[in-house]
Amino acid sequence: AVARLRLRFPALAAEAVAARFVRENAAALLGGADLLLDCSDNVATRALALEASRAADRPLVQAAVAGFEGTVDTFLPGEPVDETYWPT
């Protein structure tokens, strides 16, 4: 995915990380990133991504697909978020 992004957007600095995104490493993985792009497949990880992006004051872009439908959501720092956005 990173190679395709770099081909399409040569000025983009993107890094693929082969690690599980969990509470213990979320801050370190987000590190010096300008934003967090999340395409995870479960609600718990998506909620953690929102929490980590808020803590780091970084925008979060989340994308998901199910069958022939998809969503893309953008959460900006400081904007209110409905805490019931993801069903539990």
Image (cartoon, rainbow, N blue to C red):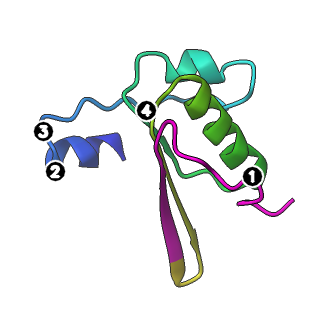
Would you call the spot at circle 2 few (<14 residues within 10 Å), some (14-19), or many (20 or more)? few
Name the disc covering residue 10, or none.
Answer: 3
Q: Amino acid at mark 1?
A: Glu
Residue 6 versus residue 62 in the image, above or below: above
Mark 3–mark 2 distance (CA, rounded to whole Å): 6 Å
At mark 1, the secondary structure is: loop
**Quadrant of the rendered structure where residue 6 is?**
top left
Tell me what residue is drawn at x 50 percent, y 28 percent: 17
Which x, y percent locates residue 85? 71, 60
Q: Amino acid at mark 2?
A: Arg
Extent of the magenta region: 70-88
Tell me what residue is drawn at x 21 percent, y 35 percent: 12
Q: Quadrant of the C terminus?
A: bottom right
Q: Which residue is mark 2?
A: 8
Mark 4–mark 1 distance (CA, rounded to whole Å): 29 Å
Q: Camera-side residue: 24 or 80?
A: 80
Q: Which residue is mark 1?
A: 83
Mark 3–mark 1 distance (CA, rounded to whole Å): 36 Å
